Image (cartoon, rainbow, N blue to C red):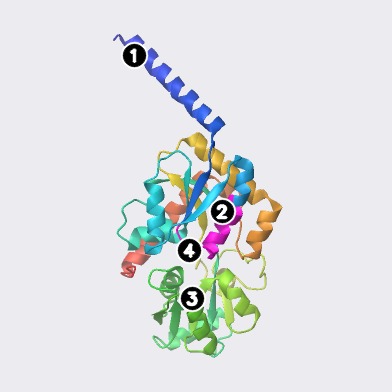
Amino acid sequence: MPTQERLLVSLACAVAFAVSGSAAAQVYPTRPITMVVPFPAGGPTDVIARIVADRMRGSLGQPIIVENVTGAGGSIGVGRVARATPDGYTLSLGTWSTHVVNGAVLALTYDVLNDFEPVGLIVHSPMLMTSSKKLPARDLQGLVAWLRANPDKATQGTAGIAGSSHLAGILFQKMTGTRFQSVPYRGLGPATQDLIAGRIDLMFDLAANALPYVRAGSVKVHAILAKSRLGIAPDIPTVDEAGVPGLYVSSWQSIWVPKGTPKPVTSRLNAAVVDALNDPSVRQRLTSLAQEIPPREEQTPEALGTLQRAEIDKWWPIIRAANVKAE
């Protein structure tokens, strides 16, 4: 075939693909969408997913069915989405743990960085650092000083190896030059009860979980592990203000689709996410759960991809240096 004819054929194919992609975006979706939540029903991730999915339905004109597929630290549900047809009808509700941490601590059948397309960041789930009322320290700087003076004497409760509470403790020790013991529990509920009773000394927990005990005066709170104060608890200082600048840990929540999903479809889904996060009732419900909604410029697929890569660059070396392996 002459060169000119080959160029014409290539151009025609490119136009055809562009037209078909545009047409797919115009008609998508034509049937219900499944959002896989890799954690149990009723948990914080599940509640966030259902709030957002319900509002996205109005933008997309189709219901989003939330399906809880649990196990192996969320990797079973996420793996199912990685293997799904990339047509926009199977979504993953992903978190910092499923799309960053698991890539360093589990032997996965998929690649957290290369087997998904980012759709949009939903919320940041900031953490609080709390301690037993029996500890003498009144603020974070005082706590750091006490821990340095008493190496390996304090105990930190966690929800298990490689969880956000455990990794936050590792980062804290690295940044402050302190040492304390980590005590894994089957969930942070039992750990919190031991913290209140003074049987353990420290905890790093999601603000949504810790705030009721802080407000009740059952535990001391030293800082929020974020750059800005929490909207529903503005009296709690940030780690920057409290004396350990840069100690940021957030178990953010986001939406992903399988690699190869057409860009017009991903864009349509992102628009639905943005609409949901702009809805006053959705914002109020998420804020009441101690979630921080990202600004508009952080809600794009590109921004989510950048966030994931930055978090991998930050956390994978820390996890590997500490030889952390999931149970």
Q: Which residue is mark 4?
A: 40
SS majority, magenta = helix
> Taking 7 as reference, is 180 above or below it?
below
In the rendered image, the quadrant that contains the N terminus is: top left
Q: Is residue 49 magenta?
A: yes
Residue at mark 1: 6
Residue 39: x %, y % from top left: 46, 62
Q: Please, what is the three-letter code of the amino acid marked with disc 4?
A: Pro
Rendered view: 259 above or below 66 = above
The residue stretch that appears in magenta: 38-53
Q: Can the viewer see residue 166?
A: yes
Screen quadrant of the C terminus: bottom left
Crowding at label 1, few (<14), some or many (≥20) Cα neighbours within 10 Å? Answer: few
Q: Are marks 4 and 2 in contact (CB under 8 Å)?
A: no
- Crowding at dot 3, Cα within 10 Å, few <14 / some 14-19 / many 20+, comes out as many
N-terminal label among 1 and 3? 1
| Circle 2 Cα neighbour tier, 10 Å, few/some/many (<14 / 14–19 / ≥20) | many
Q: Which residue is mark 3?
A: 188
- Spatial CA distance of label 4 from label 2 is 19 Å
Where's residue 103, x and y in %?
35, 58
Mark 4 falls on what kind of element? loop
Name above or below for residue 73 compared with residue 183.
Answer: above
Marks 4/3: CA distance?
A: 15 Å
From what the image shows, is residue 52 above or below residue 162? Answer: above
Label 4, residues with CA under 10 Å away: few <14, some 14-19, many ≥20: some
* Residue 42 on the magenta span: yes
Q: Amino acid at mark 1?
A: Arg
The residue type indicated by label 2 comes to Ile
